[in-house]
Image (cartoon, rainbow, N blue to C red):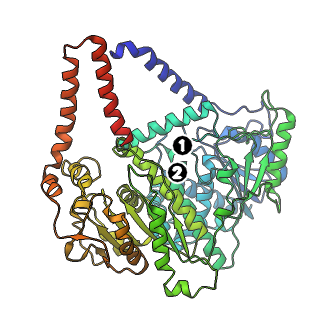
Amino acid sequence: MSIRRWWPAWVLGLLLVAAGLWWANQPNPTPTSDCLGTQTLGDGLQRQPGARRLTSVLHAFTGQPQDMRSLVCSLREAAPSDVWVPKLPFSSTSRAQPADVLAQLVSQLDKHWLQGNAQGQAYEELVIVGHSLGSLFARKLYVLGRGGSALGPSLAEPGLDAALRAAGGAPLLAARPWALATRRIVLMAGINRGWTVSHHMDLGHGLLYGAGVTLARWAQAAGTDPFIVMAGHRGAAFLSQLRLQWLALSQLAAADQQGLAKVVQLLGTRDDLVPPSDNVDPLNDFVYLEVPNSGHRDVIDMAASDSIPEAWARQRREVFQRALGDAPTSDLHPARPHQQGDANVRHVIFVIHGIRDQGFWTERVAHRVQAELLKTPECQALPPGARCVAQEVSSYGYFPMLSFLQPGARQQKVEWLMDRYTEAKARFPQARFSYVGHSHGSYLLKEAMRDYPAVRFERVLLAGSVLRSDQRWHDWLDQGRIGQLLNLTADADWVVALFPNGLEALQLQDLGGAGHHGFSDQHPRLLRLPQSKHLHGGHGAGVEEAAWPLIARFIAGGQVETGPAPLADRHAPLTRWGAPLAPAVWVLGPLLLLWGLMKLLRSRLREWIKTVAVLGYLGLIWGVLTQV
C-alpha cells in the first residue's frame, strides 16, 4: 500500500486534530459589558476600594484570565475583594513544568499580600478559586503554602525549591501568612482524582482527549517534557503527590488542633469530564454543590449571553455565592461504603500481577499473607472484630506483549497503581504498606518509587522480575522508603532469561533480567534466597502455591523461610545456555519474520491465495503480540 494512496486520510486526521485544538483554545463567551468595565484581567492585581479580602482565581487548561470576568463580578457581589487572575501557561501544547508554575504563583502571591499590607489595606483573608486544571494548582498552592517544610522531605514538591530561587521567591520553610489567612477554596469543576477518558464523555470529547493522551504518551516515550495537561491525568505524579500532601496536612492540622480552609467544589449537572462518582470523595470533608444546567467548561460563565439564558446565569451566581458563604452544606452525599476508611487497619497488602495474566491468583496470595499478619501481636492487640489487614488486589486487566513493549502503555499502569495507592493511603492512614509484585508488577513498583517520592513500603517481594539486574535500590533502602526487599529468581524462567534479559544486554528500554540473574546491588536489607538458590520452576514459580508460605512469612515478619517451595542450585539448561544468547532473539527474531513475509510475497502462488496468505501471516503475528 502506498502512502500516497492514503494521503486523504492523513489530511483528514490532521484537520480533525487541528479543529479540536482550535475549539479547545476558544475563549468562553463573555458579555460585552460587566462590573470590570475596561479593566483587563491578567495584568496584575485588580483593586476594589475598601476590600479586606484578596481572591486568587486560576483559570482552566486552554483558558484565559478574561474567561473569569463574570465569576469575578459575582464574587464581588458577595463581598468587596481585590482580585488576582494570573495568566497561566496552560495552552494545549504547553510543556511548562508544574514546579515552575507553582514557583511563580507563590512568589507573586507573596508580593501581592505584602503589597496590600504596605499600602495600609491589610488583608484579613484569602480566597482561592480554581477552574478544572486550575483547581489542582489552587489546592497545591494552599497545601504547600500552609504545610511548608512540616510536610517532610518525602512530600516536598519535586523541583520547587530550585524554581523558587529562579523566580526570586523565598523557600517554603514555615507557613506563609496568606496561607494561614485562607478561609475558603472554591473548586469549579475540580478534577480531584484526575481526568481520564471514560464512557461518561461525549463522542467528541472522548476522541479529542483520547488522541491527546496518545500524543502525550508518544512525546514522553521520545524523552520530551510531558504536556502540562498530563499533570492532571489520573495517577500522574503531580496529582498523586497532591493527594498525599493533602492527607498529611490534614493530619498535621488535626494534631495541632488547627483548622484548614473550607473547600467547596461546584459540579455542573452536564459535566462529562468530572462525574460525581469519580470525584465526590466521601473520605474528605469537602462540600459539594451542584450547579444546574452547567457543563465542565461553562460552569464559570455567570452572565447572560447569546448561549446562556439569564435564568441559567442566575442559578450559577447563586450557587457560587453560596459557596463563598459562611456554612454551605453539600448537595451530594454519594453512597460508596466500600471506600470508607478504617483507622484500625495496621497493614495494607498490595499484590500486583504481571503481563499476560488476569491475576486470579492475587486474592489467594493476599489471603495467605493476611492470615500470617493476623497472628502478629499488633493485630492480636486490637479489639475483637476490629479490622487489622486490608488487601489491594485490583487488576489492571490483561496486558499483552505488544503493550508491554510500549513505554507509554506501561506508564498508564503505573498511574493506575498510584491511584490505588493514594486511595488506600487515605482510607487507612495508620497502616504500613507491603508489596508483592510478579513480572510487570516489579516494573510498576520501581517506576512508582522513582517518580513518586511519598511512596513507602515496609516490605517488598518481587518474583519473575523484569527489571534490570543493575537496578539501584540502595538509596530507597537507606531512606527508609523500602524496609526490606526480597527478590525471587527461578531456575527455568525462560521468559525473563530470553526476553527482558535480551533487552538489557542490548541497552534497549528499561527492562532486564533480574528475575534470572538477581540484582547486582548490595545492601543488608536487599535479600535473596539462602545460598543464592533459585525456586524450581518457570516464570510463575514465585507465585505458585508452593511459594505462598514463603511470601506470607516474609511480608508478615521479614523471615526468608523457603518451606515447601522446591529449590534449585543452578539454572536449568535452557535458561543457562539461552540467557547469553538472548540478544540474538531480538535481532534474529524480526529478521526471520521479515524473511518469512518476503518469501510469501515472492512466492508463485495465485494472487488471491498470496493475498490471503500474507494477511493470515500478518494476522498471526498481530495476534501473538496483542493476545499473548
Residue 300's label in the rendered image is none
Q: Nearer the viewer, residue 497 or 525?
A: 497
In the picture of the structure, the residue carrying the numbered disc 1 is 89
Inspect the image, locate mark 2, and give the three-letter code of the amino acid beneath it. Answer: Val
In this rendering, the answer to whether 229 lies above or below 177 is above
The x and y percentages for residue 287 are: 75, 59
36 vs 9, nearest the viewer: 9
Amino acid at the residue labelled 1? Pro
Residue 304: % across, % down: 82, 33
Q: Which residue is mark 2?
A: 101
Q: CA distance from mark 1 to mark 2?
A: 8 Å
Q: Earlier in the sequence, mark 1 or mark 2?
A: 1
Tell me what residue is drawn at x 55 percent, y 57 percent. 107
Identify the residue at image location x=38%, y=76%.
554
Decide if residue 454 is in sight here.
no
Residue at (44, 58) in percent of width and height: 159
Q: Residues within 10 Å of mark 2 (few under 14, many from 20)?
A: many
